[in-house]
Amino acid sequence: MTAEYLIEYYTRNVYESPVTEALFEFIVTPASDSAQQLKEIKYGCSLPGQLFHHTNPFGFVATNLRTIKPFTEFEFSMIARVEKTYIAPKTYQPLSPEEELFLLASRVFIIDHYHFLEFTKYTTIIDEHANWIVYKQRRQPVFDFLQELNQYIYSRLEFDPEPTNVHTTASEVINLGKGVCQDYTHLFLAIARKNRIPCRYVSGYLNQGGNLTGAAVMHAWAEAFIPGLGWCGFDPTNNLLVDNNYIKAAYGTDYSDCSPMKGVLKTTGNHHTDYQVKVTQQATEPGSQQ
Amino acid sequence: MTQSTQHQFTSDVLTNYPLNLALLDEVFNKEGKVNTHYTKVLDQFSCYSVEDFKELNEHAKLSFFNQGVTFAVYSDKSKGVERIFPFDLFPRIIPAAEWQRLEEGIIQRNMAINWFIHDIYHEKLILKDGVVPAELIFSSKHYTKAMLGMKPVGNIYNHISGTDLIKHSDGQYYVLEDNVRTPSGVSYVLSNREAMKKTLSGLFRKYNIRSVQDYPQHLLSMMQSVAPESADNPNCVVLTPGMYNSAYYEHSFLAHNMGIPLVEGRDLFVDKNFVYMKTIYGPKRVDVIYRRIDDDFIDPLVFRPDSVLGIPGIMAAYREGNVTLINAPGTGAADDKAVYSYVPAIIKYYLNEEPILNNVHTYRCELETDYKYVMEHMEELVIKPVDESGGYGILIGSRSTKEERDEFKRIITANRRKYIAQPVMSLSVHATFIEEENVFEPRHIDLRTYALLGKDKQFVLKGGLSRVALRKGSLIVNSSQGGGSKDTWVLEE
């Protein structure tokens, strides 16, 4: 069974003094993989200059724009139509705890997933916060542990968009006790990696239908590698397993690989950024339903 | 010290040459006789008086002033002071057969390192097979995810390598370091040769010496060989951080001698995944960039966001195959001094060959047994940080005070991955003109070689930079640490 979504990303930026030269990079395009397919995409930009794209080191589309015509404000938008393929509820037979542990500790496995096991600036928990780290019981299946971890982070943090910014690290989130989806995800990554479970940061869109937190902005969640199953998504902000409502744009080691918008600009003074996201589920066409 | 009185020179500058039998002298053998490939030099030198030498020496210095060959030293005391690299009149001579073997060894080594770099950014087979510890590579500050899956033109990563060699008292060459980021100093090789030709032209004609002046042509043709396929007539440039960089002279020298533009980051921009150079005729596409800017600074979108030296978007253009960067970013993970100790294994792994060049035994402080050994034998070892270059942060155990050793023990223990130790190698010595005393004395030397890897093309500069530790007894030859250099003559068969 499939579901179709219309995804809209829109940003408006205002600068105190004119920007004389700029190169922007956006990672907002929905990805195409086995669970979702990009059917249609359209970009809009208020600045002169032609958008161009490249594939980043993790295989996702990054969109660039260069302009040398001075400006003090600009708008960028993206509208995409994405088809999600319904993922059946997990009916997999977990490996035995011994098999899981053996695989997680094997050299080839660790090398293959090295980037998702590494403690980056965002995913480091300092020693004085060691009591925040939870460890998997030896005989506990990885999947069960991660579900517990999802619940644990959800219950320990309070959702509050105010106190954090894009530079908040896992340990800073612990200090604050609250944060946004990005912070929940970094903490999940940090603890999963402490357990030597490969885990990656995912940036994308969440269908608003269910009144879930993280709808009007881009959302973030985690994907962990479960031995015998593969990558599996966890959303600690909502204490949910990832399903059809989650539309992926990109993954990486942490936020720094997925930041939706960045740029190198020549300007002085402050600037203000507004952005919003809209996800609408499309009516299923007659005949396509099983 | 044993002195030899067997040489027959009339010149004052060489009669009392203090031959030290404990060291390998490049010019004299153990009986104090002149090695045959040096006889013509000594015949000529013995005709000169002290005054002649002083004059020749001044003549050579003037040649450097006129060529504008200078460098700057980074230290608190001398901010931005331009100096002339001390140059020695007595050439170092390498016989043809000896060179041939060296050249084969240098190519073998750098080809293997190239495959290694490819591997650590792709399948990582050598790590999976446990030949090189994965942690060693992953913990290197030069290992970058920006290179994951990247396949540059011709599969070449270390286009330019500077392999540092020494000749030990056993008469064998040993590799001291691999430099596969941006090895510098080649302009001195060419300037030394120029000064030598002007100063001792007579002597020059008595030998059949292989040319070094063709290096810029080989460098350019290597660059052209790795241009993106879409470039019909590749536009190659040298990218410099600017005139305040210590090697700015070299950047301008190479650009000038290749006949290609010397540019700074602000002269270039990226649009639609292509790199362009701003010219008075409008933007001109750039295909190959010999960049003398460190990885961290080349693209503020990917690496350090505060870099003003680089070009935003250049890594995307590179990954899309529209521009070639020389050397590739991320090569530094392979010239780390802890990786050095695995190079013989790396050669066997990829080439299935025995290494031609020797490695110096290396203790890795991160290993428990090696760490213990280093702590207990500090006075017999040279201790080096794995990721610095230019002779900075080194401790020579035998010349250190107890306080210095205690300080090093502390910093090694705090960061064991960062330090390696090697036995003190007895670098060969070479007769060197000592200005203050107006005599020739033996001084320690090494050899920096330059290898180029292009698409189906390998080249080693026939010669290199013989660096001299000018301070008596000193083993550190880096120009930033009071070293000088000699012209290096590789003889034709």
Image (spheres, rainbow, N blue to C red):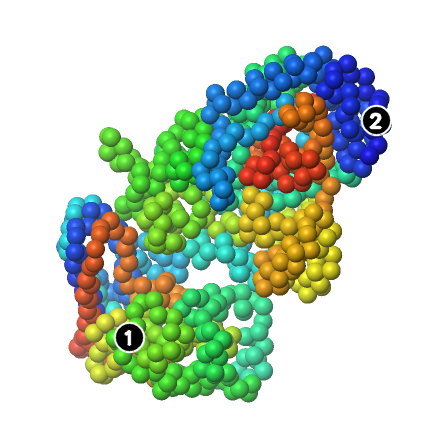
Identify which residue, B93 or A27, lies in the foreground: B93
Across and down, in percent, residue B22 comes to: 80, 37
The residue singled out by tag 1 in the image is A163
Across and down, in percent, residue B52 comes to: 65, 14
> In this rendering, would B491 be left or right of A41?
right
Q: Measuring 69% from the left and 14% from the top, which residue is drawn there?
A: B49
Q: CA distance from mark 1 to mark 2?
A: 79 Å
Q: Amino acid at mark 2?
A: Ser
> In this rendering, would A15 be left or right of A167?
left
Q: Is residue B337 visible?
A: no
Task: Please determine whether, in this image, residue B153 is positioned above or below residue A170.
Answer: above
Q: Measuring 59% from the left and 27% from the top, which residue is drawn there?
A: B87
Q: Residues within 10 Å of mark 2 (few under 14, many from 20)?
A: some
Task: Please determine whether, in this image, residue A290 is positioned above or below residue B203.
Answer: below
Identify which residue, B467 or A65, lies in the foreground: B467
Q: Are marks 1 and 2 in contact (CB under 8 Å)?
A: no
Q: Measuring 36% from the left and 45% from the top, which residue is drawn there?
A: B310
Q: Residues within 10 Å of mark 1 (few under 14, many from 20)?
A: few
> In this rendering, would B80 be left or right of B493?
left
Across and down, in percent, residue A95 comes to: 53, 82
Query: Which quadrant holds residue B237?
Result: top left
The residue singled out by tag 2 in the image is B4
**Front disc: 1 or 2:** 2
